[in-house]
Amino acid sequence: MVALRRMTEADLATIAGWLAEPHVARWWTPDTTAEAQISTYRERINGHGATTMLIASDQGRPVGWGQWYRWADHPAAAHAMQASDDEAGIDYAIGEPTAVGHGLGTELVAALVHEVRRCTGPVGLLVAPDATNTASRRVLEKNAFELVAVRPVATEPSQTPMAIYRLSP
Ligand SMILES: CC(C)(COP(=O)(O)OP(=O)(O)OC[C@H]1O[C@@H](n2cnc3c(N)ncnc32)[C@H](O)[C@@H]1OP(=O)(O)O)[C@@H](O)C(=O)NCCC(=O)NCCS
């Protein structure tokens, strides 16, 4: 099973490597850079902002990362996504190329949902991968997320359609 722990500064070099992997870069950095992402992660690890950063391990080996936040802390994005105040959002990646396609992304999403609810109680989740990111959509569907809409989201850097999924509380 995928296990989660808090991300630390010591993880950032590994994540920088994962951000450079083509299967991650394709979805994670089309509108930003790996350097900007690492800088943001460093700030969050050091307590700035309200996003919780986590490392995912499989049998003790780090394989990816995830993050979660309350939509209420991002009012403009929440409005654009039509998120409720009590809903949470997650983002996730299996960075290790050899770990992709073995069910770990599905486990990672399950672990993130469990972690969010452990911290906040039985909240709903709202997540919006790029509509063409089939693997990301499948891991949500396999975790019982339901498709709400496919449309651009005004606060996203790109106006390509997003597939908006909700998991009820
Ligand atoms: C999305 C991601 C987390 C999926 O993790 P994974 O461990 O590869 O996925 P799983 O092995 O759990 O597979 C889940 C489903 O996706 C499908 N899938 C996996 N890779 C796929 C691909 N490249 N194209 C289409 N479907 C794919 C699998 O077939 C499986 O569906 P099935 O059971 O119906 O066959 C991983 O590919 C990843 O980190 N991608 C880069 C970062 C990213 O896109 N993050 C999400 C941003 S919103």
Image: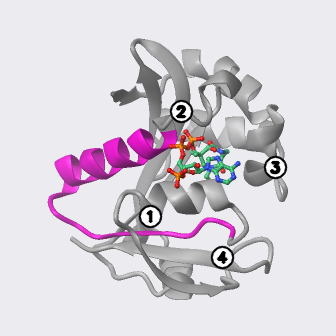
Q: Where is residue 112 in the image (x, y as percent from the top left)?
A: 36, 46
- At label 2, which amino acid type do we have? His
- Residue 46 visible to an observer of this rendering: no
Find the distance from the CA under tag 4 to the CA under tag 2: 25 Å
Judge depth for marks 3 and 2 and give the one in front: 2
Magenta residues span 105-130
Find the distance from the CA under tag 4 to the CA under tag 1: 15 Å
* Mark 3 burial class by Cα count in 10 Å: few <14, some 14-19, many 20+: few
Q: Which of marks 4 and 1 is nearer the N terminus?
A: 1
Q: Tell me: is circle 2 under 8 Å from ligand 1.
A: yes
Q: Where is residue 75 in the image (x, y as percent from the top left)?
A: 48, 78
Residue visible at 21% across and 54% down in the picture = 117
Query: Decide: marks 4, 1 in contact (CB < 8 A)?
Result: no
Question: Which quadrant, please, contains the N terminus?
Answer: top left
- Residue 89, placed above or below residue 157: above
Q: Residue 102 carries which label?
A: 2
Helix or strand or loop: what does disc 2 sit on?
loop
